[in-house]
Image (tube, rainbow, N blue to C red):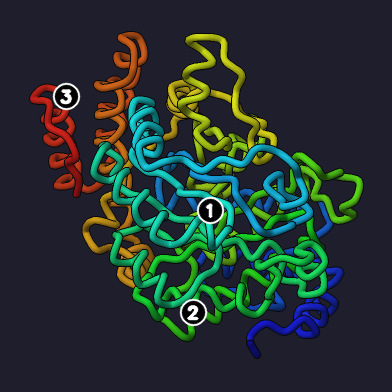
Amino acid sequence: MDWMNKEFIEKILKDGANPTHDQIEEILEKSYRREKLSHLEIARLLNASEEEQFEKIYEIAGKIKKEIYGRRVVTFAPIYVSDYCVNNCTYCGYRRDNKFSRKKLSIDNVREEALVLESLGHKRLAFESGEDPVNLPIEYFLDCLKAIYESSDIRRINVNIAATTKENYRKLHDAEIGTYILFQETYHEETFNEVHPRSLKGNYQYHLEAFDRAQQAGIDDVGGGVLFGLYDYKFEVMGLILHNDHLEKRYGVGFHTISVPRLKKAEGMDLDDFPYLVNDEEFMHIVAILRLAVPYGGLILSTRETREMRENLIMRGVSQISAGSNTGVGGYKEEKLAKELGHHKEVPQFELSDERTVLEVVEDMIDDDLIPSFCTACYRCGRTGDRFMRLAKSGQIGNVCEPNALMTLMEFLDDYADERLREKGKKFIMNAIEDIKNPDIRKLAKEKVEKIDKEGARDLFL
């Protein structure tokens, strides 16, 4: 625990106050060269205050993201299997004190949700649940994962469940999960204790060391995050950086992804009770600085944010977004029934701001010259953990990311799009293939895309 030091964070933020124009310029030049930024340099970026400095930070962040990952944006959806929860988190609609009829999906219900998500075009899911050791033992989660893999064409499930034991992480590893995701919520210990009263989750140290246990159990892809708005965002960003540094030093690889949810209205809570809410300008600042500080990691943005904010942040560092999301337990089937029969829709865990369908998100990205990606190849080719990072840092990840994104987009268009979008998307794909600089990769990508489209081949990748 010596790597997480509150006094150090407070001191480094104070030392980095009032950065000069020249200091910011030097830091950005260093970042653009992909050189690791010091804690003081990150603190200075967090304390930038001039509009010109902001614009330069955004510009460099966007360039770094595009040069590493190209135009591809990974697309996924969450699947919520239960809202049973023994915790009383003051910011969450699932909190124990909220009185409503709790739900836990049967394994058959889980299969149905997976099939609805597959029918929307998804290939990658984020598995979500409340925490309740009695109603939701690890065996239930393992059965859910098995059912999804066996009954649908979902190719990879990333898992976001409560901090658990090394033994349970080993079971998740054996179940072939993708990334294990856990939000620290806040790195400020006093705030952590305050917002998790009388909760199983309220053990700060146990929660903080969850990724160590996961790594030791063989899970080498882990994803961190905080809920911005619980405490000072500058402190939280530094906490994320220190956590990432600790993982890199001890296990050779830091966060595969960092999620950036912002506190939103939920059942049983009042936003006026939270004095550290993050405004739009601060939020854009957070995302861009994380891209500069952790250039090779994936930055995940959910449908908590508006369409406009999501499109803006994709250009400033975000590389993964959810699409067509429903945060209710069994919400996708409920939503389908609601459309067909006028049934009442499931109450979500928190309010969503971007309610576009998957098809609408895909088309909007194409219009913005971005490549929607449903790719899961790296997980299944063993490009995880330090192997993924070596490929990313060598500059070679783009040689597989964009071609694989184009292949999965062709699959999506053939299987789920109407004739108009299919025709539009195919023209986009062929133009994007011509933009691939490596002639061998370009030729291979074109061959595989045509095989998918003309021969009905599926699940091709580099």
Q: Quadrant of residue 117?
A: top left
Q: Please tell me how many numbered marks the rendered image carries.
A: 3
Q: Residue at x 67, y 31 (%)?
A: 353
- Nearer to the camera, 452 or 180: 180
Residue 145 is left or right of residue 330, and the answer is left
Which residue was labeled with disc 3? 453
Name the amino acid type tagged 1: Leu
Residue 166 point in image, percent of width and height:
43, 77
User: Could you classify mark 1 by the number of other residues whose Cα lies within 10 Å: few (under 14), some (14-19), or many (20 or more)?
Assistant: many
Between circles 3 and 2, the one closer to the viewer is 2
Asked whether disc 3 touches disc 1, contact meaning CB atoms under 8 Å apart, the reply is no
Name the amino acid type tagged 3: Asp
Which disc is residue 299 wearing?
1
Mark with earlier residue (3, 2): 2
Residue 398 point in image, percent of width and height:
33, 52
- Nearer to the camera, 97 or 458: 97
Asked whether disc 2 touches disc 1, contact meaning CB atoms under 8 Å apart, the reply is no
Please tell me whether mark 2 sits on a helix, a strand or a loop. helix
User: Could you classify mark 2 by the number of other residues whose Cα lies within 10 Å: few (under 14), some (14-19), or many (20 or more)?
Assistant: some
Asked whether disc 3 touches disc 2, contact meaning CB atoms under 8 Å apart, the reply is no
Q: Residue at x 79, y 58 (%)?
A: 230
Quick check: 280 above or below 140? above
Quick check: 323 above or below 135? above
Find the residue positioned furthest to the bottom: 2
Real-space CA distance between mark 3 and mark 1, rounded to the nearest whole angstrom = 31 Å
Which disc is residue 212 wearing?
2
Residue 167 is left or right of residue 415, and the answer is right
Q: Residue at x 48, y 72 (%)?
A: 254
Residue 17 is left or right of residue 204, and the answer is right
Real-space CA distance between mark 2 and mark 1, rounded to the nearest whole angstrom = 21 Å
